[in-house]
Amino acid sequence: MGRYPTIIITKELDNSEYAIYSCGPSIDMCDQFPELYERWRFKVLKDKLTIEEGYVLLDDMSKKHFPLFYKCMFKVYKQVEECGGMAILKNIDLPNQIVFII
């Protein structure tokens, strides 16, 4: 295959307390190559002020994939910072989808 496929971060749920995102290759890619790829979910807590407190992984993930999780966290965090930061997260309209290439 060569390189890792395009990563898609998709907002699954958003309410006043938190947002839940799923991240990883596309669902089609995960279905096509389940032995290679999977998607994971993480929660963005809207009442926290730091990235360490505000982002929580919801699924089991092997240590080799943690760099991918951190990249996905950072992509969402960057969007939050561009809109005013964690202090006003409850008022920020989080993106529905972020796509990037590793």
Image (cartoon, helix red, strand yellow):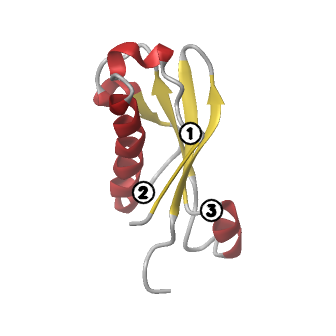
Q: Is the residue 55 above or below the residue 59 in the image?
A: above
Q: Residue furthest bottom?
A: 1
Position in image of residue 21 (x %, y %): 56, 39
Position in image of residue 3 (x %, y %): 43, 79
Residue of label 3: 26
Which image quarter: residue 73?
top left
Q: How many numbered marks appear?
A: 3
Side (left or right) of 81 relative to 35 = left
User: CB under 8 Å between callouts 3 and 2?
Assistant: no
Task: Identify the residue shown where x is 58% and y is 61%.
Answer: 38
Q: Is the residue 7 above or below the residue 93 in the image?
A: below
Give the secondary structure at mark 2.
Answer: loop
Q: Type of residue at label 3? A: Ser
Side (left or right) of 100 relative to 13 = left
Mark number displayed over residue 62: 2
Q: Type of residue at label 2? A: Ser
Residue of label 1: 21
Give the secondary structure at mark 1.
Answer: strand
Q: Dot 3, how many residues are within 10 Å of its Cα: few (below 14), some (14-19), or many (20+)?
A: some
Q: Dot 1, how many residues are within 10 Å of its Cα: few (below 14), some (14-19), or many (20+)?
A: many
Q: CA distance from mark 1 to mark 2?
A: 18 Å
In front: mark 1 or mark 2?
1
Give the secondary structure at mark 3.
Answer: loop
Position in image of residue 22 (x %, y %): 57, 45
Q: Residue furthest front?
A: 83
Q: Type of residue at label 1? A: Tyr
In front: mark 3 or mark 2?
3
Task: Identify the residue shown where x is 51% and y is 31%.
Answer: 43
Q: CA distance from mark 1 to mark 3?
A: 13 Å
Side (left or right) of 14 relative to 44 = right
